[in-house]
Amino acid sequence: MQGIIIKGIGGFYYIKTENEVVECKARGKFRYLETPPMVGDKVEISIAKGKGVIEKILPRTSELFRPQVANVTQAFVVFALKNPDLNFELLNKFLIQCEHKNITPVICFNKIDLVDEFEKEKIHETFKGTGYKIEYLNAKSGIGVNRLVSRLTDNITVLCGPSGAGKSTLLNKLLGKNHMETGSISEKIGRGKHTTRHSELIEVHSGLVVDTPGFSTLELNYIQKDELKNYFPEFNDFDTHCKFRGCIHYKEPGCKVREAVDNGKITKQRYDFYIKYLQEISERRNNRW
């Protein structure tokens, strides 16, 4: 029997099959193979004496480790425009992760009531040429939420972003009920309290949504220097026209990406982040023993 893991708690996994949800344990072989089951995994199970056992994990199309979920096709990358202030560096790291995992990101800017139109346009301009879909929301009041509903169909969607951005509130609106406890913002530090206890797949509007904990840091130590450029889609139209094959768009002469930045076709803010992270990768490699 096949199904998909919709929840995992305390060593138990809940598998949604065609007709029911089955509670299962995983065979010990998965621990030895260092491939424990993840929420989102498609699995084969057996049932004996009323107890389910995961026998096989089918090949994954994608993997995320923070949050830990498999086979995601789409990410609602949720960031508040204010309270807490928008962290562009963290947002760019989330987008790089999506690109690396072949997951389609939808940038969801929440709390639009806290900024004016000028600020909103300035933020929108930052992602010029990326092709990313951008939605502006006030999850608390429901503004913009309906635009996200049609994006759920036939997708496994993860809500990710920093604590306090409004992910819990957004999910509650998508579900039409209070699925999760929502956290308040600490006035002292301006960060959200962690309120989600485990990852779970929830059926919403003919799709599956992953309810995940909020977090505020994201490390991308697996990204290599020569591949980083591949995760900036605005570079694609210019990369192949660079003078040198394998150009990493830093100091090489005849670089068409740098030329596009100078001409305003690629935003300087995104390019500056690219260079900063490129240098971090180089320093990390040089510091290895």
Image (cartoon, grey):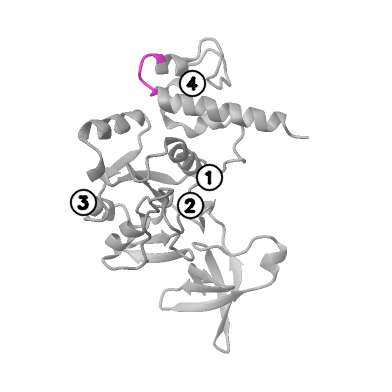
Q: Please tell me whether mark 1 sits on a helix, a strand or a loop.
A: loop
Q: Which residue, given by chain and number where applicable, does mark 1 sit on?
A: 218
Circle nearer the N terminus (4, 3): 3
For residue 21, side relative to residue 107 (left or right): right
Q: CA distance from mark 4 to mark 2?
A: 36 Å
Q: Please tell me whether mark 3 sits on a helix, a strand or a loop.
A: loop
Q: CA distance from mark 1 to mark 3?
A: 28 Å
Q: CA distance from mark 3 to mark 2?
A: 24 Å
Q: Residue at x 62, y 64 (%)?
A: 36
Residue 143 is marked as 3
Which numbered disc, 4 or 3, marks the residue closer to the eye? 3
Q: CA distance from mark 4 to mark 1?
A: 30 Å
Q: Given contact means CB atoms under 8 Å apart, are the residues at marks 4 and 2 in contact?
A: no
Q: Which residue, given by chain and number where applicable, does mark 4 sit on?
A: 240
Magenta residue span: 262-267
Residue 215 is marked as 2
Between residue 240 and residue 283, name the one nearer to us. 283
Q: Residue at x 52, y 51 (%)?
A: 62
- Give the residue type at disc 1: Leu
For residue 284, side relative to residue 249 (left or right): right
Q: Residue furthest bottom?
A: 49
Between residue 239 and residue 158, name the one nearer to us. 158
Q: Is the stretch drawn in magenta largely helix, strand or loop? A: loop
Circle nearer the N terminus (4, 2): 2
Q: Given contact means CB atoms under 8 Å apart, are the residues at marks 2 and 1 in contact?
A: yes
Q: Residue 286's quadrant in the figure? A: top right
Circle nearer the N terminus (3, 2): 3
Q: Please tell me whether mark 2 sits on a helix, a strand or a loop.
A: loop
Q: Position of residue 236 (x, y in %)?
A: 44, 27
Q: Given contact means CB atoms under 8 Å apart, are the residues at marks 1 and 3 in contact?
A: no
Q: Residue 129's quadrant in the figure? A: top left
Q: Given contact means CB atoms under 8 Å apart, are the residues at marks 3 and 2 in contact?
A: no
